[in-house]
Amino acid sequence: MSKPSNAPLWVFVPNILVPEMALERLSANAQAQSFAGLPAGLLQTMARTAAPEYQAADGLDRIEAWLLRYLDSPAQAKFDQYPAWAMMQNAQAEEEPMPFTRFWGTVGNLEIERDGVRFTPPEVLQVSKADLDAFWNVVQPLLQQHDWALNTPAGFHSLLSNPVPVPMEQASPWSVQGIRLTDYLPMTHECSGWRRMWLNMQVELHHAEFNQAREAKGLKPLNALWFWGGGEAWQTDVPLPRVKSVSEDGVFDAVKMTDGADEAVNRFVFWTQLLGSLQKNELQASAAGSGPKPDNVYCVNFQGWGGNVAVFKLLESEVLQPMRLAGLAFNWVLLGNNGWKTLKSNWMNRFKFWQNQPNWAVLGEPEMQEGPSEEELQAAWQQGQHDQDSIQAEWEGR
């Protein structure tokens, strides 16, 4: 996805795409009635632009996948499976870190279930400052013994570095769900020191008094420091966007996660706050007027079809109409369960006055590909058992 230089405005609508099979079952009249609440600006764009290509998130969180393409349109971030977020630099950076020497470390709760690992990030765990301090008091000595240094303050998400590369790619807290623990713990010799340190952390945190106190209160323990985002160094010359939340209450700057905000808004808040520390020079240059200006992302609090569509009226009056009066081009990003579609709205659409029938197929989301075969699942299970036995033997010193 290249970043359109003439469209510094983006309107995100979560939960708007519907499965193509469900869409095809509806008659033309039923489609028109079902989607009647959409804003006039979007209906016109759907009628007067070519059908957009569906962009799959490829197993990542949708906002993470979109933001990666936005910041890295030349695809400089080389990775096999998970983006190297800890290795991102601004274009003015003088020194490039060695590959796989920086990782984000996220405090959280790790649960092992039948279908894989479930990692719960700290934002939803009711973590007090005392619990957070107690967590780092347990973890920091182990990190220091293995030459890990904190490059940002010890918080929910901290940037860690080590002079010795640890060649592994790991998922972010928002894209990790369902990964097997044996996939998370790399079995290569180069990662053996990190693997032992990580397993020792599990033991120390399991027996920590503050975690026993949390469990006595019915809270989940903080039993893991999730390493993620390592890889090859890459640069971006695009500043992070400014994010605004659009709800029935109005249009506001999205500066913190809230219970009432849409999931997409909270994801944007997480990423812009996390990556902002890696873009300090670029943000300062933008503020001084010497660098590229950040785009504005308006994220609509839409819960999906069958819910309240009143927010679209406010979107039309407070956001879209002023854009049209100013002659500004902007992009629609229509989110589904596993990806998105991008529509471009610009002044040329006004001249296609004869095209007024929206193409409802724009709102269709392709079905997911079929899952692995029984043979592939059996082979994966056998490999997982072998890796688990190896991890257990290493832990016990056999």
Image (cartoon, rainbow, N blue to C red):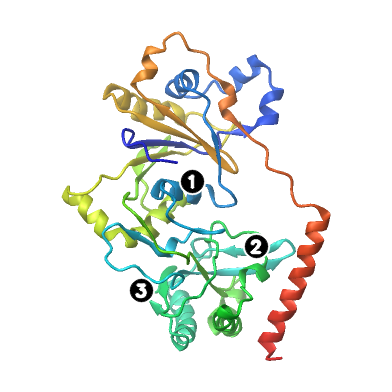
Q: Are marks 1 and 2 in contact (CB under 8 Å)?
A: no
Left or right of 152: which side holds 200? Answer: right
What residue would you read off at disc 3? Answer: 151
Query: Residue 283: where, in percent of width, then height?
Result: 26, 54
Q: Which of 354 and 112 is in front in this view?
A: 354
What residue would you read off at disc 2? Answer: 179
What residue would you read off at disc 1? Answer: 264
Assess disc 3: are there few (<14), some (14-19) or many (≥20) residues with their C-alpha within 10 Å of its C-alpha. Answer: few
Residue 394, which numbered label? Answer: none
The local secondary structure at tag 3 comes to loop
Q: What is the C-alpha distance between the residues marked 2 and 3?
A: 27 Å
Q: Nearer the viewer, residue 195 or 92?
A: 92
Query: Residue 266: where, in percent of width, then height?
Result: 46, 50
Amino acid type, label 3: Asn
Amino acid type, label 2: Ile
Q: In which quarter of the image is the N terminus?
A: top left
